[in-house]
Amino acid sequence: MSTDFSQSDAQRLGSEIREVRKARGLTLNALSQVVSCSTAYLSRIELGTAKVSVALLGEISMALSVDPNWFFPAQAGQGPLERQHVVRAENRRSLSGMYTRTTTELGFEDALLSSSLSGQCYLILSRFPPGSGEPPEPLEGYVFEGEQHAIVLSGEVELRLGDEVIALRAGDSFSYPSQIAHRFRNRTDEEATMVWAMSPVRISW
């Protein structure tokens, strides 16, 4: 792991640190209290205008409960733009380990399809193991700011949207404002997969 990289890489790293920090519910000031730098310097790191040492990145990663190597995705390709913007299937980064809820509680596992979390939206691949995602009683739905768009690639997923229960099958797609309470589960004996586009970027469940 090296922290000697280009300005665009520094901006990507800073943006991803910011998104993980926000997902953990930490302010810049709160994070600065447990790492060896000031709030102002942390802000510059998140903006991509300040260098971050390996030691400091280790401190930040520990405070955010994430492996520092997660911030350095494997990149493959012949040209710099390909390496920066294309994600090969074998190089996808897991998102599930960053959530506050477990995979068992959520009923699905997520992998990041986008090359970074630094944009205004991002793509994820969700896998729903057979018979997973049984909702608690009383039913709890997720509600947050933003919007979600998705398509079911395989299998069947049950979507609870507000008070409605909707069966989604391969090829079905949907979109809704995330302020509507929603939750998913796979009630079948086969795995189901979906690809999502979500905005704004958030990695807290």
Image (tube, helix red, strand yellow):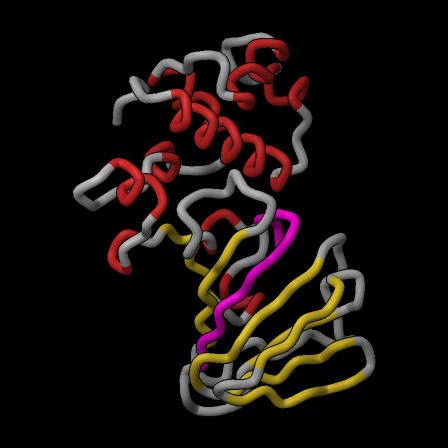
Q: Quadrant of the N terminus?
A: top left
Residue 85 appears left or right of 126 = left
At x 56%, y 85%, the residue is: 172
User: Which of the 4 image quadrants contains residue 31?
Assistant: top right
Q: Nearer the viewer, residue 49 or 71?
A: 49
Judged from this view, the residue extending furthest toward the right is 163
Determine whether 183 is above or below 115 in the image: below
Residue 16 position, x and y percent, is 50, 35
Q: Nearer the viewer, residue 150 or 136?
A: 150
- Residue 64 visible? The answer is no
Determine whether 188 is above or below 162 in the image: below
The part of the chain drawn in magenta is: 192-205
Residue 173 position, x and y percent, is 58, 79
- Residue 68 visible? The answer is yes
At x 26%, y 22%, the residue is: 2
At x 28%, y 60%, the residue is: 89
Residue 121 appears left or right of 116 = right
At x 50%, y 43%, the residue is: 117
Determine whether 83 is above or below 53 in the image: below
Determine whether 26 is above or below 45 in the image: below
The answer to whether residue 198 is magenta is yes
User: How many numbered badges does the structure rendering display?
Assistant: 0
Q: Quadrant of the C terminus?
A: bottom right
Residue 189 appears left or right of 142 = left
Q: Nearer the viewer, residue 151 or 54?
A: 151
Residue 45 position, x and y percent, is 51, 18
User: Which of the 4 image quadrants contains residue 33?
Assistant: top right
The answer to whether residue 76 is magenta is no
Residue 144 position, x and y percent, is 75, 55
User: Which of the 4 image quadrants contains residue 47?
Assistant: top right
